[in-house]
Image (cartoon, rainbow, N blue to C red):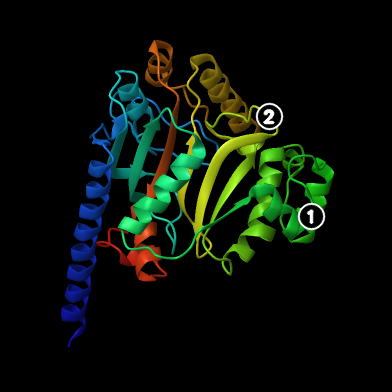
């Protein structure tokens, strides 16, 4: 078989399997009473999260390509729509590589009046419906971090994080030395992440408050954020949160992230007014999760390069 025919066959197989996978996902949510919705890809507001890089258009008033559908879905929650999900494209200005694309497909859903452990089980059930059979353990961020580095991420000093990061060859600038979120990330990426590649699939729970993003803090331990990540073969597949539902708290988070962006020399992003308005009008207690479809495909079909899962546009 010549190369062009082989490539065509591979492309047909990728999209055939994806169509079946999407059918299974939709069947699962339908059986659970979760409503599928479609929301805008373009927004007047970009993401404030320092770890995410926005892609934008500048024709007249600036528009941002969404990094997730979170803002729009929370606006729908304020209209008492109940549990909702969306499957659609999202965009991030990232370097393309084996695990990263600028444009990829997100499965994002929100469950009302549940706790985070319910959502973890929800992810387990969805993956099982999609054909994933491996056992998925649960561990805490602190346990992983401390076993790998000897440091407790919730109470160690910044100087200890600096020493650990430098020992592992991380290049830190003077302005980084008091950026605790960055230091935790530096140690995690250089010390913890390499170990995860040899781990069984795992849900990591109880993140440090510096990495809470838009998760609520624990009511019993103020240094702990109520969020999780699902890691398979060392790769983040899904990211879940016990969501902030108070407008003032969310506004504080946007402002805190912009202060961090300023410290890191990043563009300031106007807080998402539509998101804040939705929370002000009333959103029920809710937990949400975002799952990368292409990364799920990598886990299901033992694929090592995300770039093989579509028509090349890079």
**Quadrant of the rendered structure where residue 309 is?**
bottom left
Quarter of the image where the C terminus is located: bottom left
Q: Where's residue 150, x and y in %?
A: 80, 55
Residue at (69%, 60%) from the top-left corner? Answer: 191
In the displayed structure, does residue 202 sit left or right of residue 157? left
The residue where tag 1 is placed is: 164
Q: Position of residue 27 (x, y in %)?
A: 22, 49
Q: Is residue 20 visible?
A: yes
Dot 2 alpha-carbon crowd within 10 angstroms: few under 14, some 14 to 19, many 20 or more: few
Q: Which residue is mark 2?
A: 220
Residue 14 % position (x, y): 24, 66
Residue 264 in sight in this render: no
| Relative to 100, residue 47 above or below | above
Based on the displayed image, in which of its 4 quarters is residue 114 positioned? Answer: top left
> Looking at the image, how many numbered discs can be counted on the residues?
2
Q: Quick one: label 1, few (<14), some, or many (20+) residues within 10 Å?
A: many
Q: Quadrant of the N terminus?
A: bottom left
- Residue under the point 39% across and 58% down: 295
Say which quarter of the image contains residue 32: top left
Up the image or down, 254 lies above or below 5; here it is above
| Residue 146 left/right relative to 253 | right
* Along the viewing direction, whichever of 167 and 82 lies nearer the viewer: 82
In the image, 204 versus 56, the foreground residue is 204
Q: Secondary structure at mark 2?
A: loop
Residue 81 is situated, as x and y percent measured from the top left of the image, at 28, 24
Q: Which residue is drawn at the image coordinates 59% and 35% (left, top)? A: 212
């Amino acid at each position: 078989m010549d190369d062009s025919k082989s490539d065509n066959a591979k492309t047909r197989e990728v999209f055939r399997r994806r169509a079946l996978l999407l059918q299974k996902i939709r069947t699962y949510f339908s059986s659970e009473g979760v409503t599928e919705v479609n929301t805008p890809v373009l927004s007047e507001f970009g993401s404030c999260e320092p770890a995410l890089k926005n892609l934008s258009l500048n024709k007249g008033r600036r528009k941002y390509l969404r990094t997730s559908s979170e803002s729009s879905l929370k606006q729908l929650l304020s209209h008492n729509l109940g549990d909702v999900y969306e499957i659609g494209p999202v965009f991030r200005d990232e370097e393309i590589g084996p695990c990263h694309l600028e444009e990829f497909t997100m499965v994002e859903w929100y469950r009302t009046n549940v706790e985070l452990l319910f959502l973890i089980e929800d992810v387990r059930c969805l993956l099982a419906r999609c054909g994933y059979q491996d056992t998925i353990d649960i561990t805490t961020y602190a346990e992983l971090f401390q076993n790998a580095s000897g440091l407790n991420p919730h109470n160690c000093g910044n100087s200890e994080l600096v020493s650990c990061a430098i020992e592992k060859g991380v290049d830190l600038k003077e302005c980084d030395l008091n950026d605790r979120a960055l230091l935790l990330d530096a140690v995690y990426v250089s010390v913890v992440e390499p170990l995860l590649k040899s781990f069984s699939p795992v849900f990591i729970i109880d993140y440090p408050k510096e990495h809470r993003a838009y998760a609520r803090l624990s009511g019993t331990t103020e240094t702990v954020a109520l969020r999780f990540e699902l890691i398979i073969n060392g790769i983040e597949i899904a990211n879940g949160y016990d969501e902030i539902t108070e407008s003032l708290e969310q506004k504080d988070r946007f402002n805190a992230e912009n202060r961090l962006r300023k410290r890191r020399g990043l563009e300031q992003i106007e807080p998402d007014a539509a998101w804040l308005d939705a929370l002000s009008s009333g959103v029920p207690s809710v937990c949400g999760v975002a799952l990368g479809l292409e990364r799920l495909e990598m886990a299901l079909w033992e694929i090592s390069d995300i770039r093989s899962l579509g028509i090349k546009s890079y």
